[in-house]
Image (spheres, grey):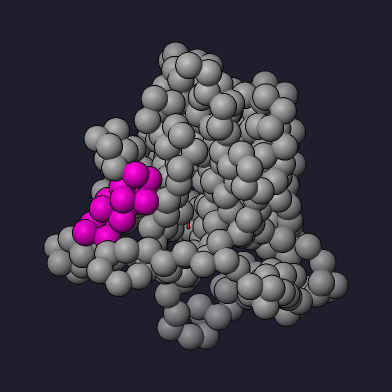
Amino acid sequence: MTHMTWGTIATWRMAHEGVVKASELLAQDASAGDAVEALINLVEAYPYYKSVGFGGLPNEEGVVEMDAAFMDGDTLAQGAVAGIHNVMHAVSVARALSAEHYNSFRVGAGATKFAQLQGFEMTNMLTPRAKQVWLNRLAEMRDQDLNPYDGHDTVGAITLNKQGSMAAATSTSGLFMKKAGRVGDSPLSGSGYYVDSTIGGAAATGLGEDIMKGCLAYEIVRRMGEGQTPQQACDAAVYPFIEKLRRRYGKAGEFSLIAMNHQGEWGVATNVEFTFSVATQGNPARILLANPGPDQTTTIEPITQDWLDAYEKRIKAPVPGLADPARN
Ligand code: ASP
């Protein structure tokens, strides 16, 4: 049977232009891997997204350390990097590593060296804007008793092409003010991402330390494999787990999961206001807003223009202390 439907879903409003791009590629018969990489590359290169790639916020020492992963849903090949430095497109490095049977998940200096030797674009990822945000936070933390860890977000995406092949990928600069060497869920198989073309895929964003405790991406794919729809699988994997964490660990960080199955049906679950972008054949890319709903369900509504305008203003807001405050 020829597979005809394509689809893609990705975390946060920041992924939207990437979802548009991936839709164009998928409509033209691109591979699922090319589409997911192109989607994430756009987010990585955009300087105003402060949790991914160029312009991403640094660790507490002022160093931008990135985590990324790529998975091919046909072969189950995976590649990942953690704590990589100075590379424009961490997800492309992860994809290159997915071609290796050995050494396919690399960290720190080894990951950075691999990227350099392979000729990936290397650049200082700490923009003046991100550096100033970091300096301001250091000052705030000196002056007030603040939890330093309140900035993060990952771009995570799933693609399904017309041939029925799927791919998943993630990229993030991780938790703002993290300790050097801290790694989140995003490069970890089964926690931050998972995909199997015969079933579907899932990806996560949010507090990695807690997402890992539930291997949530794998759990969603497993549930879809047992016949649940993506929305059922997301709700059933995420909400009881949040309760379990609260009961047994005492608290649960914020997190959100997305999923798409091999027929292009999709779902999300979240314990915080969460935007995402989704497109399938016949349904052009659109940004939707999800929130936890009643009785372990998720409410999903279209985004409003007001929300989008406020977002645009927020990401480009002048940063106090920056010589040219509007600079990226
Ligand atoms: N999951 C990422 C991490 O823990 C950050 C995020 O998506 O918010 O590094």
Please identify the residue farthest to the top as the structure is shown. Answer: 101
Q: Quadrant of residue 179?
A: bottom left
Q: Is residue 154 left or right of residue 284?
A: left
Q: Nearer the viewer, residue 218 or 51?
A: 218
The answer to whether residue 60 shows anywhere in this view is no
Magenta segment: does it hold 27?
A: no
Q: Is residue 283 left or right of residue 248?
A: right
Q: Quadrant of residue 195?
A: top left
Magenta segment: does it hold 239?
A: yes
The segment highlighted magenta reads 229-241
Q: Where in the figure is residue 212, as x and y percent of width and height?
A: 31, 48
Residue 196 to residue 172: above or below: above
Residue at the image position 31 percent from the left and 47 percent from the top? 233
Residue at the image position 29 percent from the left and 33 percent from the top? 225
* Quadrant location of the C terminus in the rendered image: bottom right
Residue at the image position 37 percent from the left and 63 percent from the top? 298
